[in-house]
Amino acid sequence: MSRSNSTGRGEPKRLLGNTAIPAGAIITREQAQSLIGRVVRMSKADEVIVGVGGGYQSDVRFANNQMSTAGGVSNGQVSVTSVFGKKHATTATNDLSDESLKRVVEQSEALTKLSPDDPEWLPGLPSQTYMPGRGYVEATAEVTATERARAALTALEPARKAGDLNAAGFIIVSAGANALGNSKGLFAYNRATIANYTVTVRTADGTGSGWAGAEHPDWRQIDFRKLSATAIEKARLSRNPVAIEPGRYTVILEPQAVGDLVQLIGGSLGARGADEGRSAFTKAGGGNKMGEKIVDQRVTIISDPFDSQLLAQPYDGQGLPLSRQAWIENGVLKQLAYSRFWAQKQGKVANGGATSLKMIGGTTSTADMIKSTPRGILVTRLWYLRQVDPRTILFTGLTRDGTFLIENGKITKAIKNFRFNESPLFMLNNVEAIGPSVRIAGTEGGGPVVMPTLKVKDFNFTSLSDAV
């Protein structure tokens, strides 16, 4: 592992040069296959499962109108799961020498023998067929420290020039590979790149805050200048917010706010929870709600590792190949996520989970949504979401970094932030308009998420917050 840092204005000090990725930082398919084979040959267990991951991540962080850090980290890790009968245990190392691999295999086997039986353990998958992933973009892997610094200046230069704004942000660029194999012949390999930019701009008087962000496997798809300008504009517009009464309002949620809430459906899609009566998708009287209409008929939510906006890993953590899955289609719950164990028990086919999530967009622009709103609230994003009731996917959280009142089709003033209690299922039953879908800048749940702007009625704000 290596790391470099530089501070101060202007071009970062180059301790690693201006190259994008150190040679050998990303393990190749052949190297991963060879490494997994070495571990399998070292194993004395009934079965051994090997995970390999790592790559190179570079970043630029800035705050108070100055770059504060710029660096790069390369790392690699191997995890080894040994299996004896129904017992299993996992150990890991980032030292890939033969001595270290031998030690981690022996530790895994020793821990396995001490472990209790796992009655739900299933033998590892045999060899599978995978479509090649499309999430690796050479242009992202080749991004240099100078390019990252120039991207940061899209926020820093106008904020410094303004004199009354403070900009803070983070740019992360990563390129890496993951592989999974076992002693039954399974081998999966995927390379991926990600560029992520988030920026917050505060006004010097401390009353205004604006935010913008984006993420994509292709660095060239992120419009840094536009995002920085959006955060600055929102910071200025949100100064001196006024308080309005909490209650149920028509709201226009920008894609990040929609994703913050709707992506929580993905964690509730497990078939087992629904079948056992612990889920929002449990049917009254027993069973689950598959085939029932659960939200507005305009709502369709899918996972698809090959969708051009998602570009996710084409297999799950057990090596199951992933393909397009429609979870909710035209408002109807089409399927739930079956693990291998629960699928076998219920006579179903294991389909992996929602490792990526996309809500199909519409055609209504945000401007048209605002024009059609006599009185409502525009929300930039949500924050600090915490679960209240898993049976309804009810969450509480706060609005943040740009909340505005709409009156007679126009944004008229900044308003103080709210705490809300809302379920994405309730919200998706109150849809009035849907905008185009975009990939958002990440969520607490992780994974690629693509969401539209939504206009919904009766969004439940429960109290005011003095937080900016």
Image: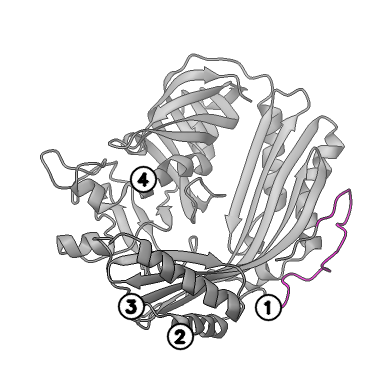
Q: Horizontally, is 76 left or right of 390 in the view?
A: right
* Residue that numbered label 3 is attached to: 46
- The CA span between labels 3 and 2 is 12 Å
Q: Residue at x 53, y 35 (%)?
A: 383
**Which one is in front in this view, the residue at disc 1 or the one at disc 2?**
2
* Residue that numbered label 2 is attached to: 41
Q: Secondary structure at mark 3?
A: loop
Q: Amino acid at mark 4?
A: Ile
* Residue that numbered label 4 is attached to: 265
Q: Residue 194 location in percent, x, y?
A: 60, 62
- The CA span between labels 4 and 3 is 38 Å
Q: Secondary structure at mark 1?
A: loop
Q: Are there few (<14), some (14-19), or many (20+) residues within 10 Å of tag 1?
A: few
Choose the circle earlier in sequence order: 4 or 2.
Answer: 2
Q: Secondary structure at mark 4?
A: helix
Q: Amino acid at mark 3?
A: Asp
For the magenta stretch, what is the residue range? 5-24
**Which one is in front in this view, the residue at disc 4 or the one at disc 3?**
3
- Relative to the observer, which residue lies in front, 454 or 39? 39
- Relative to the observer, which residue lies in front, 1 or 257? 1
Choose the circle earlier in sequence order: 1 or 4.
Answer: 1
